[in-house]
Structure formats: structure tokens, C-alpha cells
Image (cartoon, helix red, strand yellow):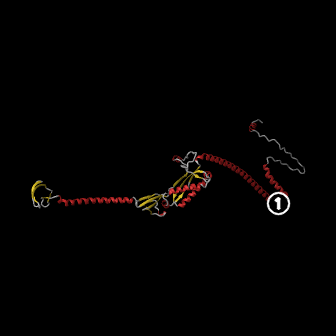
């Protein structure tokens, strides 16, 4: 049978007609192998089963991939909560905005730590060993970053412009410029983090207050020259009082304070400082000379006193020794005075004779007086020249 064929058949509507149409697909029977003509509706159940199976297989593969992707994402999500705390840090965990560590002992120390990822947990790291600093320029003159970087100050101005320059009023109603730098470390992380929104601004406001307070307590000469240490101590004391009242949880370090006169009076203050330096130099020189003279005089006086004390002690000791010697020989003298005198004389001559250059011995004659005359102004004997003596030795006799 051809694909297109003219045929006639009867419909259930009760009429017969002939028409031409294309035949639909044929269904081949598995039992007979003969083609059975049919429409697309006949194939719908078979096509639905095949599509369902293909869709199920695709969905099953997709679900496996989705499960692996979700597992990986969950692992990454959990691993993102691992964090490290440095050796000089403390960590604070906020869970839904509430702190989990309420005391300093409960803060997380150095090492690897875990927290649930954001937005469940939020980790706040606090560098407790770091030294922070704030600088107050409320009383400082206008300058530029270039001058600040090189440590220079602007040239003197003829007037003070309060619109751009800061200044303070001293206790004696003078103008001066003051700048202070405060350094601090964190001692109580809980109070530091949760006590104030911006702790550094609070410290700077307290430092500004301390500068103005101390300036009103000191005269300008005291703050500039005469009592700089006292002025700095007053600022430190006032700042510590304000911070202790606020309970910021910090520990203050030494404060640096710089005081300068007004720029338009800088030359005059420099002259005063130069004159003060010259005066101090002259006074120190005079005091040094005074100290040297006094030390020399005291040394000479001590030498004289010590020498006199030594002579006095020696004479006293010698006299006492001679007195004891004479007392010890008093009984002997009383027994034989003549013999005692001769022995004393012999002892004295034994001490004297070895030191004499010339000795004259005279024999005594009984009863007759004798006279001895000595020429005390004799000329010294001339020494014989060695050459002359040598030549005289070879002369014929």
C-alpha cells in the first residue's frame, strides 16, 4: 500500500464518502509484525513514560550535584568562623550583638579560635599591648604638614588670628601656645570597647580640658621657663582625674608638653631667654669660681690643722715618753748621781759624735786652765782636679 491512497470507509454518522488523506504513522505489532495504523494520541503514554524517566534521571543527577555544592558551601561557611588572635591581642565575640565575654579573664587569648560566621557572631580584636596616642592642638598655632614633618615652626607673625590659630590664657592674663601628646595602653578591654563609642575622641576632649585648666593655673614665665615640669605635671594630674572619672579602661603613659610664646612676640621672648641664659652662665661661672676658691682654702686650712694636730700629738707623745724615761731612772740617779750623769753624757755623745764632721780631742790637765781658739771662717779646701792629679802621678820624683 502506498503512502497516499484513495479508499472508502463508513463513519458512524451514517454517510459514505470517498476522500483522500495522508495516513498516520503505523504501529508495528510485536506479535504479528504487521503495521497497525494510528494517531499521535496513541503514542502519548509511551512518550510520557520516556520523558518522565529522562527527567527523573536529570533531576537525580542535579540533586547529587546540589547536595555536594551545599556541603562544600556549608564547610566553607563554617571554616570562615576560624580566626587567629595575635600575641599582643585579646578577642571579644559578639553573638547577635551581645558580648559573650563579660570579664577580662574570659577574653580570648592568642591562638586559633572559632566563632560562628557573620551575622551570627562578630569578632572584635583588641590590641592590648599597643601604645595609642592622641594630640591636642587646641592651643597651638596654625602650621602646615610640611613644617610638622620637618619639625620646624612657622615664622613670626605680626598679629594673632584667632580664627585659624589656637591659644591659651595664662594665669597672669597672657597669651601662649600649648600642645600636648598623651599616650596610653588598654587596661580594661570591656570598658574600652563598650564604655564609649569613640574612646580616642573622649581622651582628646579631656586633654583639651586639662591644657586650658593648667594654663589658667600658671603665669606665662612659669609655663615657658621657670616651672615647665610643674606645668606638665598639672596637665597630667588633671587629665588623669578626668579619665578616672570616666572609667575608660586605659593606662596613661608620660605626657609630652610643648609651650611656645605668641608668634608675634617670639623675637622678644628669644631676647629674654638669651639674656636669662647669659645671666645663668655668669652666675654659674661665679659660683664655680667661688666653689673652687672655697675648696682650695678649705684644703689649705685642713692641711694646716692636720699638720698642727700631728705636731701636737708628736710633741705630746715625745714629752710623755721622756717624762716616763726620767721617772723610771729617778731612783737610779738618787743612788749614784755621778755615775748616772756620766752614762747620760756618754749616751748623748754617742748620738752626737757620728754626725760631726770635725772633732777636737783635748786632754785634761789637773788644775790648769786651758784655752782653745777655733777659726770658724776658714776657706773650704779646694778639690784636686782629676786631670792634674793624673799628670802629677807621671812626674819624675
Instruction: Tell me residue 103's x, y (percent).
Output: 48, 64
Percent of width and height locating residue 384: 76, 39
Query: Number of numbered discs present?
Result: 1
Read off the residue under disc 1.
Answer: 330
- Farthest residue, direction top: 396
**Mark 1: few, some, or many residues within 10 Å (few <14, many ≥20)?**
few
- Position in image of residue 295 (x %, y %): 70, 51
Please state which of residues 338 and 21 is positioned toward the viewer in this rendering: 21
Q: Residue at x 81, y 60 (%)?
A: 327
Furthest residue to the right?
Answer: 367
Query: The C terminus is located in which quarter?
Result: top right
Toward the viewer: 319 or 128?
128
Judge from the rendering whether residue 1 lies leftward or rightward of residue 52; answer left or right.
left
Q: Nearer the viewer, residue 137 or 244?
A: 137
SS at mark 1 in the image: helix
Answer with the quarter of the image where residue 238 lies: bottom right
Q: Is residue 41 positioned above or below 151 on the image? A: below
Q: Is residue 24 left or right of residue 318?
A: left
* Quadrant (top left, top right, bottom left, bottom right) of the N terminus: bottom left
In depth, the one of 356 and 309 nearer the eye is 309
x and y percentages locating residue 332 in the rendered image:
82, 60
Q: Quadrant of residue 75?
A: bottom left
Amino acid at each position: 500500500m502506498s503512502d497516499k491512497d484513495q479508499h472508502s470507509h463508513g463513519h458512524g454518522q451514517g454517510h459514505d464518502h470517498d476522500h483522500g488523506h495522508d495516513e498516520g504513522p503505523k504501529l508495528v505489532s510485536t506479535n504479528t509484525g504487521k503495521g497497525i495504523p494510528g494517531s499521535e494520541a496513541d503514542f502519548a503514554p509511551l512518550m510520557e513514560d520516556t520523558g518522565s524517566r529522562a527527567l527523573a534521571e536529570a533531576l537525580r543527577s542535579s540533586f547529587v550535584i546540589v547536595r555536594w555544592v551545599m556541603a562544600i558551601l556549608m564547610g566553607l561557611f563554617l571554616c570562615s568562623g576560624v580566626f587567629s588572635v595575635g600575641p599582643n591581642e585579646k578577642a571579644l565575640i559578639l553573638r547577635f550583638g551581645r558580648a559573650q565575654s563579660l570579664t577580662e579573664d574570659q577574653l580570648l587569648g592568642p591562638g586559633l579560635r572559632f566563632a560562628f560566621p557573620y551575622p551570627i557572631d562578630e569578632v572584635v580584636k583588641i590590641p592590648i599591648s599597643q601604645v595609642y596616642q592622641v594630640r591636642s592642638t587646641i592651643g597651638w598655632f596654625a602650621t602646615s604638614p610640611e613644617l610638622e614633618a620637618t619639625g620646624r615652626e612657622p615664622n613670626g607673625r605680626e598679629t594673632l588670628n584667632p580664627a585659624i590659630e589656637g591659644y591659651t590664657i595664662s594665669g597672669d592674663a597672657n597669651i601662649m601656645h600649648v600642645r600636648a601628646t598623651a599616650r596610653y595602653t588598654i587596661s580594661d578591654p570591656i570598658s574600652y570597647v563598650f564604655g564609649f563609642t569613640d574612646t580616642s575622641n573622649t581622651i582628646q576632649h579631656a586633654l583639651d580640658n586639662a591644657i586650658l585648666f593648667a594654663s589658667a593655673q600658671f603665669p606665662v614665665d612659669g609655663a615657658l621657663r621657670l616651672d615647665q615640669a610643674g606645668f606638665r605635671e598639672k596637665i597630667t594630674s588633671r587629665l588623669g582625674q578626668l579619665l578616672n572619672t570616666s572609667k575608660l579602661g586605659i593606662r596613661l603613659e608620660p605626657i609630652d608638653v610643648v609651650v611656645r610664646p605668641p608668634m608675634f612676640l617670639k623675637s622678644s621672648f628669644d631676647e629674654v631667654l638669651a639674656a636669662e641664659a647669659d645671666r645663668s652662665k655668669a652666675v654659674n661661672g661665679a659660683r664655680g669660681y667661688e666653689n673652687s676658691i672655697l675648696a682650695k682654702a678649705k684644703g689649705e686650712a685642713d692641711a694646716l690643722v692636720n699638720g698642727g694636730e700631728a705636731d701636737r700629738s708628736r710633741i705630746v707623745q715625745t714629752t710623755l715618753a721622756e717624762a716616763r724615761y726620767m721617772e723610771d731612772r729617778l731612783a737610779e740617779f738618787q743612788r749614784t748621781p755621778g755615775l748616772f750623769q756620766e752614762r747620760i753624757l756618754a749616751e748623748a755623745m754617742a748620738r752626737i759624735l757620728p754626725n760631726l764632721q770635725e772633732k777636737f780631742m783635748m786632754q785634761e790637765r789637773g788644775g790648769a786652765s786651758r784655752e782653745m781658739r777655733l777659726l770658724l771662717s776658714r776657706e773650704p779646701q779646694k778639690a784636686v782636679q782629676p786631670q792634674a792629679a793624673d799628670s802629677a802621678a807621671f812626674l819624675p820624683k
